[in-house]
Structures are given as C-alpha cells and as structure tokens.
Image: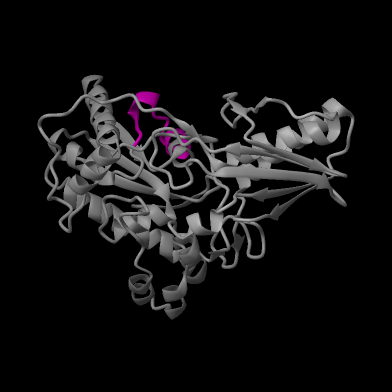
C-alpha cells in the first residue's frame, strides 16, 4: 500500500500544472481500513481514566461518541492510578493511512482541577509558541475538536458518577518529541512534541490513486445526471459551506481533498458548466501560487513570495497562511481567491467551464470569494 501511495504521488507532481493526465488504465481500487485520530484516542483514554478515578475500576475497553455519531470501541493499552489521579492509554491505529503516529501510545491522566476542564501537555505533546494556529501561544497543542470531545466525556462521566466537571487532563505521547520531528510542527512553532488532532475522530485511508479515481467517478455521475454546477472542496467544513451557499445536491459535491490537479484535469477532459473550489486559506494560497497537489508533504506556502506580493516584510516570518492574512488584512484572502481562480481557470481554459473560488476559515466563515 505504501508503494502504491508513493507511485500515485509521483504522478501528481511536476512543475507544469497541465502536464499530468490520468492514466487510461486504472487498477482496481482496494478497500482501505480506516483508523482513529490522536484526538479520538485521547478522548477514549480520558473516559477510561475517569471511570477508574470516579468508579474505582478500569474498563477493559471503552466506547466514545465521535462528532458525526460513530461509536468506536478502544481496548486499553495502558493503565495506572494513584491517590487522586488515574491515567489510561490507547494505542493509535491509523488503519491503512501512512500516518507517522500509527502505533503511538496516547495517554490521558485525569486529576481534580480548581475550576472546569483544564488541559496540560505531558511528555511528547507540543506547546504552541507562534500565532496563526487555532490554539493560542502558550497552550498545549490540543486542537479545538479534541478538546470539545474530551469535555463531552468529562460531562458524561460526571453525570454518571455524580461528580463535578472540575478535571485537569494531561495528554502524553511517549516518544512524541521524536515523532514530531517528522512532521511540520517545528516549522509551525509547536515545540516539544506532537499535536493532538482530528475534526471527525476518523483517519480516512490516504491512497492517491483511489482518491483521484473517486473524484473522477463523482464527475462522471454528476455529468450523467445533467448537473451544470459541481464543487470540489478541501475538507468537510468547506464542503458544508459551499453546498449551503449554492444549494447544491449531495452528488454535486466532489471530495477533492488535496487533489486539485486530479479534479481540474479531469474536468478539462469532461467539462461541466461551472466548478466551485472551496477551501481554507492555506490550501487555496498554495493553489494560487501554482500548486495542484495541496498536501502539506508535497507543497508549501511560499511566505517570502507573499511578503513581496503584499509589500509586508513581516509575512516572510509567518507560520501559516492564516497568520499571514492576519498580518496583511482582508485584502489578502480576496486577492488569493482571485489568483487561485485564475490558476484553476488556466487548467480548464477553452472547455467552457466557469470557475470560482470560496475561501473559508476554520469556523466556516467565508473570508473571500472570487468575482
């Protein structure tokens, strides 16, 4: 599986955004096993630790409710308790995704706090040191959705055991500092370890060839049904915003992910009247700068170019595109949307497809739309 992913990655790369054409012969798409995010593992570990702290015993396994209603069950891989505290650990299973944290032990220790739910970074979990991320500097690198998931299990357990929700949660990943060196965390200003991530709790297997083939099939279905307007988005938040914005049916929504090139080049050969591309400021900035594979391991925002383009030298030291936009102001998302639209339009030029861009923030607010 890993080799298939690497081979597909090579197909997408290249300096010329019009150079890649999907192969005429496609291999059968294997069904890939999904996995669980570090955020889901930390939530399950938190619940198991609370069951020991408040109920007196560790469970053999624990079930949690994910943001979309799934209820996975996690076996415990670690358990320990002392006076006034308990901790449990879950071994992360990333399924068939090539995830550097696959097999890592995610531990949550719970103890009484002064007021409400508090989060602490233990061994192997990083601290945010720069602006531009969804968590402010000085805080543990535990993203908003995992934090809310853990708050939810604290509330659930507090009701079950008749306790208050004054709990401190310390999340640890032994060896996480070394694993983090294989990620972009050091560059983003996250020091000392990994981030606890996940917006759905699920790691969806990452196979480039399978994903691109699914985009192609989605376009085929939309065309066969006579749809005039389709949309490709980088993630679930942007997809929801774009679908609501234009009132599009489900089968008009193409799960583009990072594969803007795979989408645009198939549209070039199998055109529709209108294509909307929606995504966060980071990925849309990369598209505006000419990248068509938007994955973080294969394309990066050129902050020095942004600094020159917007006559803002401070942007050269920015850690994320959102941070750059905060430095530049509202004109940056607007101009990025226009440039991304122009780049995408070049790829489908001459086939009669009108392209527009929608730039969305993490909360689902529209930052800019191309004209």
Residue farthest along the top direction in this orientation: 225
Q: Residue at x 67, y 60 (%)?
A: 139
Q: Is residue 131 left or right of residue 49?
A: left
Give the image location of residue 84, x and y in percent: 87, 44
Give the image location of residue 310, x and y in percent: 38, 73
Give the image location of residue 178, x and y in percent: 50, 58
Q: Residue at x 39, y 78 (%)?
A: 311
Q: Is residue 153 left or right of residue 196?
A: right
Res 152 seen here? no
For the image, the number of numbered tags is 0
Check the image and tell me how it is coloured: one colour
Residue nearest the observer in this picture, 368 or 192: 192
Residue nearest the observer in this picture, 6 or 325: 6
Q: Is residue 333 left or right of residue 161?
A: left
Kindly indicate the quadrant of the structure image that contains residue 175.
bottom right
Q: Magenta includes 280?
A: no
Residue nearest the observer in this picture, 284 or 96: 96
Residue nearest the observer in this picture, 8 or 124: 124
Relative to residue 25, is residue 6 depicted above or below? below
Relative to residue 61, is residue 143 depicted above or below? below
Give the image location of residue 252, x and y in percent: 33, 28
Q: Which residues are magenta?
A: 240-255
Q: Residue at x 18, y 28 (%)?
A: 27
Kindly indicate the quadrant of the structure image that contains residue 109.
top right
Q: Quadrant of the N terminus?
A: top left
Res 17 seen here? yes
Magenta span: predominant SS is helix
Q: Is residue 187 left or right of residue 60?
A: left
């Amino acid at each position: 599986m890993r080799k298939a992913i690497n081979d597909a990655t090579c197909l997408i790369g290249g300096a010329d955004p019009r150079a890649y054409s999907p192969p005429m012969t496609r291999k059968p798409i294997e069904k890939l096993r999904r996995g669980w995010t570090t955020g889901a593992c930390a939530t399950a570990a938190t619940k198991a630790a609370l069951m020991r702290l408040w109920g007196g015993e560790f469970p053999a396994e624990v079930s949690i409710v994910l943001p979309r209603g799934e209820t996975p069950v996690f076996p415990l891989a670690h358990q320990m308790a002392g006076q006034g505290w308990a901790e449990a650990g879950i071994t992360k299973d990333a399924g068939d995704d090539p995830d550097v944290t696959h097999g890592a032990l995610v531990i949550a220790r719970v103890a009484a706090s002064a007021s409400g739910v508090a989060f602490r970074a233990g061994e192997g979990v990083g601290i945010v040191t720069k602006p531009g991320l969804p968590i402010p500097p000085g805080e543990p690198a535990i993203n908003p959705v995992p934090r809310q998931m853990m708050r939810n299990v604290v509330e659930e357990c507090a009701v079950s055991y008749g306790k208050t929700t004054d709990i401190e949660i310390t999340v640890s990943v032994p060896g996480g500092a070394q694993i983090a060196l294989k990620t972009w965390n050091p560059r983003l200003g996250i020091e000392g370890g990994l981030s606890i991530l996940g917006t759905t709790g699920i790691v969806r297997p990452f196979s480039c060839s399978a994903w691109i083939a699914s985009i192609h099939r989605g376009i085929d279905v939309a065309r066969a049904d006579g749809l005039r307007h389709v949309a490709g988005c980088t993630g679930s938040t942007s997809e929801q915003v774009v679908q609501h914005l234009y009132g599009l049916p489900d089968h008009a929504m193409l799960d583009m992910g990072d594969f803007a090139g795979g989408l645009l080049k198939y549209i070039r050969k199998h055109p529709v009247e209108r294509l909307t591309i929606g995504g966060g400021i980071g990925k849309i900035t990369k598209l505006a700068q000419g990248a068509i594979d938007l994955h973080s391991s294969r394309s990066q925002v050129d902050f020095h170019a942004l600094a020159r383009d917007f006559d803002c030298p401070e942007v050269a030291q920015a850690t994320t595109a959102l941070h750059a936009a905060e430095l530049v102001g509202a004109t940056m998302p607007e101009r990025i949307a226009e440039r991304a639209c122009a780049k995408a339009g070049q790829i489908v030029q001459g086939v009669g497809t009108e392209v527009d861009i929608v730039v969305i923030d993490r909360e689902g607010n529209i930052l800019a739309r191309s004209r």
